[in-house]
Image (tube, rainbow, N blue to C red):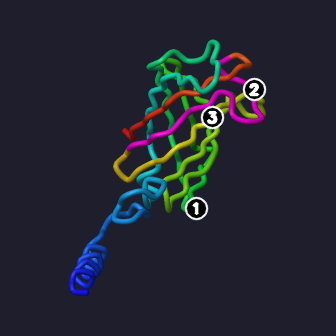
């Protein structure tokens, strides 16, 4: 009985000292990047894309291509679409950006479109962490939209990112 009591006491003491924002047990497991603030999510982001083998991908962005975005995040995690945009450097043309960031988990779902009223766009899904990083995927086209850079077969990219 004594070993069980000791083990339970250690478990309770360890849990009491836990300070991780990860929803999993002792910071292990769970999903998302943890609680983030509006300020941590907002700002200028850079994403470097690398094709995956998930979709057949004909055409599309070259591996190592950069996508930049300015996120103007509102208090509820939605983007202020009039002040949020994305670019494909070296071009300086800005394109519309919309979507949401769950501030409780960092879970991110953004639509990068080619223009107002356009039927083409890509979806950037993943997780923003409090440490100014993003991990996720970029899919061209987004569900229900036409491709932007790929052909009709579509492309998926690993798209790690960092906040400037």
Going from N to C along the chain, the mark reached first, 1 or 3, is 1
Residue found at x 43% / y 36%: 161
Going from N to C along the chain, the mark reached first, 2 or 1, is 1
> Does residue 143 belong to the magenta stretch?
yes
Residue 126, which numbered label?
Answer: none
* Residue under numbered circle 1: 76
> Does residue 113 belong to the magenta stretch?
no
Foreground: disc 2 or disc 1: 2
Foreground: disc 2 or disc 3: 2
Asked if the residues shown at circle 1 and circle 3 are in contact, with their CB atoms under 8 angstroms apart, the answer is no
Crowdedness near tag 3: few (<14), some (14–19) or many (≥20) residues, C-alpha within 10 Å: many
Residue 146, which numbered label?
Answer: 2
Residue 112, which numbered label?
Answer: 3
**Residue with the most extreme top position:** 59
Distance Cα–Cα, label 2 vs label 1: 29 Å
Describe the element under mark 1 as helix, strand or loop: loop
Q: Position of residue 19 (x, y in %)?
A: 30, 68
């Amino acid at each position: 009985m004594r070993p069980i009591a000791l083990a339970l006491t250690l478990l309770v003491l360890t849990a009491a000292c836990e300070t991780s924002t990860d929803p999993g047990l002792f910071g292990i497991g769970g999903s998302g990047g943890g609680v983030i603030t509006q300020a941590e999510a907002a700002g200028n982001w850079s994403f470097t894309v690398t094709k995956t083998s998930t979709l057949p991908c004909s055409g599309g962005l070259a591996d190592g291509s950069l996508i930049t975005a300015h996120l103007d995040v509102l208090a509820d995690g939605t983007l202020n679409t009039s002040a949020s945009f994305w670019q494909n450097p070296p071009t300086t043309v800005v394109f519309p950006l919309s979507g949401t960031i769950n501030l409780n988990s960092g879970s991110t779902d953004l639509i990068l479109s080619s223009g107002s009223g356009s039927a083409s766009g890509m979806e950037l899904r993943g997780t923003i962490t409090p440490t100014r990083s993003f991990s996720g995927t970029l899919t061209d086209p987004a569900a229900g939209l036409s491709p932007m850079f790929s052909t009709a077969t579509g492309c998926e990219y690993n798209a790690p990112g960092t906040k400037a």
